Amino acid sequence: MKNPVVILDFGGQYSRLIARRIRELNVWSEILPWNTPLEQLESHNPLAIVLSGGPASVYAEGAPGLPAGLLEKGWPLFGICYGMQLLVKEAGGVVQRSEKREYGVLPIEIGDSPLFDGIQRPLRALMSHSDYITQAPPGFEVIASTPSAPVAAVADGQRKIYGVQFHPEVADTGQGKKLLENFLLGICAIEPNWTMGDFISETVEAIRDQVGKESIICGLSGGVDSSVAAALVHKAVGDQLTCFFVDHGLLRLNEAEEVMDAFADRGMNLIKIDARQRFMDRLAGVDEPEAKRKIIGEQFIREFEAAAAKLGDARFLVQGTTYPDVVESGDGQSATIKSHHNVGGLPEDMEFELCEPVRELFKDEVREVGSRLGLPDSIVWRQPFPGPGLAIRVLGEVTPQRLDILRLADAIVREEIARAGLDREVWQYFAALPNVRSVGVMGDQRTYQELVAVRAVTSVDGMTADWARLPWPVLERIAHRIVNEVDNVNRIVYDITGKPPGTIEWE
């Protein structure tokens, strides 16, 4: 393995996103917990170390700190948000609670520094902090500021130690990738020599090492994540892999048939499991989002266990888990936002050992791997769809009638966006049933029926998102068709919430 850039994870939501941005520069990166001992860091022989953001305050009791002796090792260091504050504190600067917090994309006044070479002024960057630096450490230069954060970036150019209060790794910081490039390729003079092709070959070898000659099964939903995971495993172990498509009754209109048709000629062993009634029985009367996710996650495992038993012994289970699934479910460092069925929803007594070949990747990286593996565009660019399916888009109790309403409404949303040629421009789009009824009038009669919410967002990686500015005629056609073609619906609303503060899904 090439010498990495090591990211020390202090529990921030964007730690894996930092790793991904570094990989985009064709530089290998690895993530280690903040309390990794110095001798273990030395064994990685890092080219540079990045200190991630995190939810703690540097002056709080028990707050994560730097590995002892890190500042004396001579490695180039780059601190982000909490990572910068910690670096400043340890180097002799002052961090305090701010009377005015900074959240959102703000203009940053930047000075002359190699860190900002080629950056247009003012830099607009994502701020997310309630502490701020009032005094830079001895030997450090202040190279950026905002009205509420007079020390928004610092530099000790001689030791190649830099810190920024904002988040260059997120898409909202439009020139953030250039800033990371300036640090890694410019200041640190790191040679870019890693590609996604390297990831594929390394992952295939890792799968072979993990699985050996044993049988392995895969829960194949037909979405890009599980499809690419299955393709990687199939490339590694061939016919040792058997894939199961579980029809849990929570799919979109005609989706089961479409998935089976799409994989008919892929050369994989694919078996369909009709589990619709079992899932519906378990979801009956359940309306709490986390409870629904955990029930669905557990039932998936039970279906795989029963299917594997019919085949004989299968020790391993492939899942298309990606990093946004992990970070939202909480990974021991970051906070739990919602439990994804294939992460926080897994039962403790599960009999399988997991094989998750795309766990460290983001959606667009997964798509790139799929294209490199020769998967068709119909799979690689398939609209993202959560494992719990429509159960988390039907808010409240999931019933067959409400699922039918949502399937038809969702199909109309997808048809009209594709018809407008926007299906590649919009990251994700769907209908949700928010468990709200309203009064309407149809044919001179009073109605009291369901409200349908339309959700469409733009994003690069799913970690942050903005609501899509769909053309008014497209929204008009969607609303007109749903109220005219779907029974028991009399009102349509459009969700214009970003992520944050919302998530892309409603539950």
Image (cartoon, grey):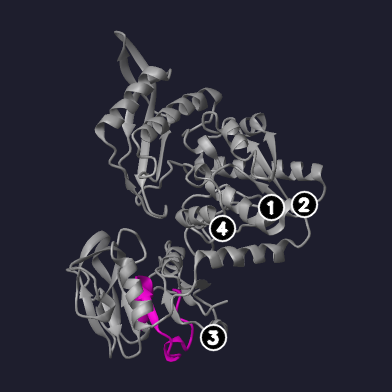
Q: CA distance from mark 2 to mark 3?
A: 39 Å
User: What amino acid is labelled 1 in the image?
Assistant: Leu
How far is the residue under mark 4 from the one under mark 1? Answer: 13 Å
**Residue 314 image label:** 2
Q: Are marks 1 and 2 in contact (CB under 8 Å)?
A: yes
Q: Is residue 84 magenta?
A: yes
The residue lying furthest to the right in this view is 312
**In the rendered image, is residue 100 in sight?**
yes
Label 1–label 3 contact, CB within 8 A: no
Q: Is residue 328 magenta?
A: no
The answer to whether any part of residue 85 appears in the image is no
Q: Secondary structure at mark 2?
A: loop
What's the residue type where badge 2 is placed?
Answer: Ala
Q: Which residue is mark 1?
A: 317
Q: Is residue 95 left or right of residue 17?
A: left
Query: Which element type, helix, strand or loop, lies under badge 4?
Result: loop
Which circle's residue, 2 or 3, is located before the other in the chain? 3
In the image, residue 380 above or below residue 395: below
Which residue is identified by label 4?
358
The structure residue drawn at horizontal position 32% and vertical position 19%, both measured from the top left corner, is 439
| Distance Cα–Cα, label 1 vs label 2 | 8 Å
Magenta stretch: give its range: 62-89
Relative height, residue 219 to residue 431 (above, below): below
Using the rendered view, name the quadrant where residue 286 is placed.
Answer: top right
